[in-house]
Image (spheres, grey):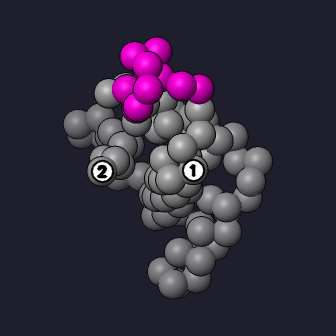
């Protein structure tokens, strides 16, 4: 199971604006969805350990998924953000 990476806030810093928090959650959700799609699809090069999955494959999938989500090219995080913003209003 993948653990979501939550944005850190410096101690004593003001909390992020609601819009920023919703957008961060949308990007995290997109990254999680992509990581799960990559896991189920079994994509990627064969493990250097040979045969099955390596113990580090999940880290690679997560990094790839976060890069896709951070790029914003798919528009999925934006669609999720708009849905969350509508519900929060």
In 3D space, how far apart are the residues under numbered discs 2 and 1 (Cα atoms)? 16 Å
Give how far across and how far down residue 88 sits, in percent: 48, 80
Give how far across and how far down residue 72 sits, in percent: 70, 48
- Secondary structure found at label 1: helix
Q: Does the image show residue 64?
A: yes
The image quadrant that residue 51 belongs to is top left
Compare residues 54 and 68 and report the one nearer the observer: 54
Give how far across and how far down residue 79 sits, in percent: 67, 69
Outermost residue on the left side: it is 11
Q: What residue do we see at 30% from left, 51% from top? A: 1
Q: Is residue 88 left or right of residue 13?
A: right
Report the span colored magenta.
Answer: 45-54
Give how far across and how far down residue 81 sits, in percent: 59, 67
Q: Is residue 38 magenta?
A: no
Categorize mark 1 by other alpha carbons within 10 Å: few (<14), some (14-19), many (20+). few
Residue pointed to by mark 2: 1
Nearer the observer: mark 2 or 1; the answer is 1
Compare residues 27 and 2 and report the one nearer the observer: 2
Q: Does the image show residue 28?
A: no
Q: What residue do we see at 73% from left, 58% from top? A: 75
């Amino acid at each position: 199971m993948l653990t979501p990476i939550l944005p850190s806030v410096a101690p004593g810093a003001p909390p992020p604006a609601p819009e920023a928090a919703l957008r961060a959650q949308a990007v995290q959700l997109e990254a999680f969805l992509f990581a799960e799609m990559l896991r189920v699809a079994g994509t990627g090069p064969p493990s250097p350990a040979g045969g099955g999955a390596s113990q580090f494959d999940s880290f690679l999938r997560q990094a790839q998924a976060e890069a896709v989500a951070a790029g914003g090219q798919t528009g999925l995080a934006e669609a999720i953000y708009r849905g969350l913003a509508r519900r929060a209003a």
